[in-house]
Amino acid sequence: MEAQLDAEELYLDSGKSPREAASFGLSDMSEENLPELSTIKRLTSAIAELQKQQMDSGDSTSVANLSQMEMVLGSQLSSGDSGKYSINQLVSLATETAALLHLDQNTSYDFLDGQTPAQVLQQLKDQHQSFRELVGNFSAAYPSLTEGEMASYFQRSQIYGEAAAMQWVVQQHPPADPAK
């Protein structure tokens, strides 16, 4: 986050408006994460291939251990400062989803807090759907933000994360009720 603030200050010093500076700073920070996220995607694919090999050899314990490791990786992406970025949240969901695909879907696992992969996959699917709805509602509200709301949105993004900031925007500009 500190790098984002430094970039934002540079944009302000170059004559950009506070809105532009915050937007460019957030964009720059997201771009810095992309190479790391690409590496995580390759790692997830390699783990999936290894899981398939272990499954083919009948080693379900190794498959479960690899899944647990992948779940930890996904969880780390969505926590702390890295969890403030929407792209990290999405990669976390994809990583955790991939982690569960090679497990027996009807067996509960300790590392899933006693739940089955099928149950956790449904929760991940629901989270992804909620995020998509949030992004859709945010996208509809974004054009109508005032300069002050925009500044508050970017500040909230830095402090609380993009999803929380988008939720705030949607609360300020609720979507129209389609039934009306």
Image (cartoon, helix red, strand yellow):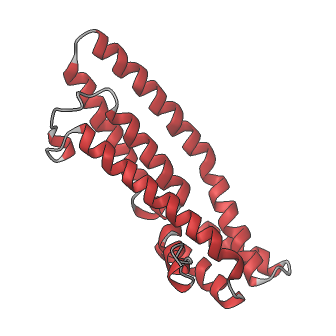
Can residue 1 be seen from the camera position used here? no
- Please say if 10 is above or below 49: below
Location of the N terminus (image quadrant): bottom right
The residue depicted at 71 percent of the width and 76 percent of the height is: 143
Spot occupied by residue 123 in the image (x, y as percentages of width and height) = 31, 51
The residue depicted at 73 percent of the width and 68 percent of the height is: 24
Q: Which residue lies furthest to the bottom in this view?
A: 148
**In screen coordinates, is 133 left or right of 61?**
right
Which of these two is toward me, 63 or 139? 139
Spot occupied by residue 129 in the image (x, y as percentages of width and height) = 45, 55
Q: In which quarter of the image is residue 118?
A: top left
Which of these two is toward me, 69 or 7? 69
The residue depicted at 51 percent of the width and 66 percent of the height is: 134
The residue depicted at 51 percent of the width and 74 percent of the height is: 179
Q: Residue furthest right?
A: 15
Spot occupied by residue 91 in the image (x, y as percentages of width and height) = 49, 47
**In screen coordinates, is 129 left or right of 70?**
right
**In screen coordinates, is 14 left or right of 78?**
right
Count every numbered label the image shows and give the total: 0
Can residue 110 be seen from the camera position used here? yes
Q: Quadrant of residue 60?
A: top left
- Please say if 14 is above or below 71: below
Which of these two is toward me, 135 or 163? 135
Q: Residue furthest top?
A: 57
Spot occupied by residue 115 in the image (x, y as percentages of width and height) = 18, 44
- Please say if 58 is above or below 6: above
Q: Quadrant of residue 151?
A: bottom right
Location of the C terminus (image quadrant): bottom right
